[in-house]
Image (spheres, rainbow, N blue to C red):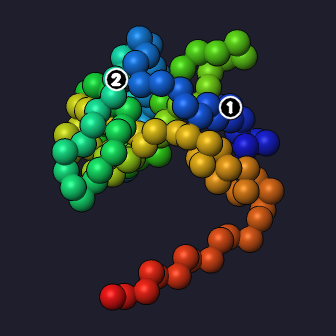
Amino acid sequence: MEDVTGGFELLPYPGYDHRKVRLIGYPGNSDTTHPKPLDCTSSTHRYTSTDPAAPGDFLEIACAGYIGGTSGGPFLVRDFTGYALIGVIGGYHTGGDFPDVSYSSYFTTDTLALYLHAVRGDTPATPRPAPPSK
C-alpha cells in the first residue's frame, strides 16, 4: 500500500514538545458533516496518565473536532525530506476522552522494530507464557 500511496519515515524517541505538529484524521461518519479529512497544526507536549488502567507518558495535542474514526491518523513533524511520523491518534484511552484533545503512544525503538518486522513479513511472535502462579 505504501508503494502506491506513499508514507513517512517513522521517528522513534522524537521528544514530547514540538511547536508545529500536523495532525490528520479521517472521521468515521458517512454523512456530509465531515466530507474531507481533518487537518490541524498545533503543538504537542507530554501527558503523564494518572489512570492506573492506562499508565504511561503520551504525546498530547489540541485540535478541535477529532471524533470517532480519526484513530490512526498521523502526528507529523517537518524533517529534511518533508515529514516524519512521530505518533498516531490512539494511545491514552484510544485517542482521548474529548474530540478536541488527541493522544499518541510514545514511539520507541520497539515501535520501529515492530514496523520493520511487519514490512519484512516476519511471522508474528507467539504470546509469552503466563508467569507461574504462587
| Residue 112 percent across, percent down from the top left | 65, 44
Q: Nearer the viewer, residue 39 or 118?
A: 118
Residue type at mark 1 is Glu
Name above or below for residue 23 compared with residue 116: above
Q: Mark 2 sits on what residue?
A: 45
Q: Quadrant of residue 6?
A: top right
Q: Depth check: give the residue in front, 117 or 35.
A: 117
- Give the image location of residue 79, x and y in percent: 64, 15
Quadrant for the C terminus, please. Answer: bottom left
Residue labelled with disc 1:
9
Which residue is at a point 48% across and 30% down the rendered structure image?
Answer: 75
Q: Estimate the spatial distance between the alpha carbons at disc 1 and disc 2, rounded to whole Å.
A: 21 Å
Figure quadrant of residue 10: top right
- Residue 65, percent from left and from top: 26, 33
Q: Secondary structure at mark 1?
A: strand
| Percent coordinates x, y for residue 87 in the rendering | 49, 36
Secondary structure under tag 2 reads: strand
N-terminal label among 1 and 2: 1
Q: Residue at x 59, y 47 (%)?
A: 111
Determine whether label 1 and label 2 are within 8 Å by CB. no
Label 2, residues with CA under 10 Å away: few <14, some 14-19, many ≥20: some
Dot 1 crowding, Cα within 10 Å, few <14, some 14–19, many 20+: few
Question: Is 133 above or below relative to 119?
Answer: below
80 versus 104 height, above or below: above
Amino acid type of the residue tagged 2 in the rendering: His
Q: Is residue 7 left or right of residue 33?
A: right
**Residue 65 visible in this rendered orientation of the protein:** no
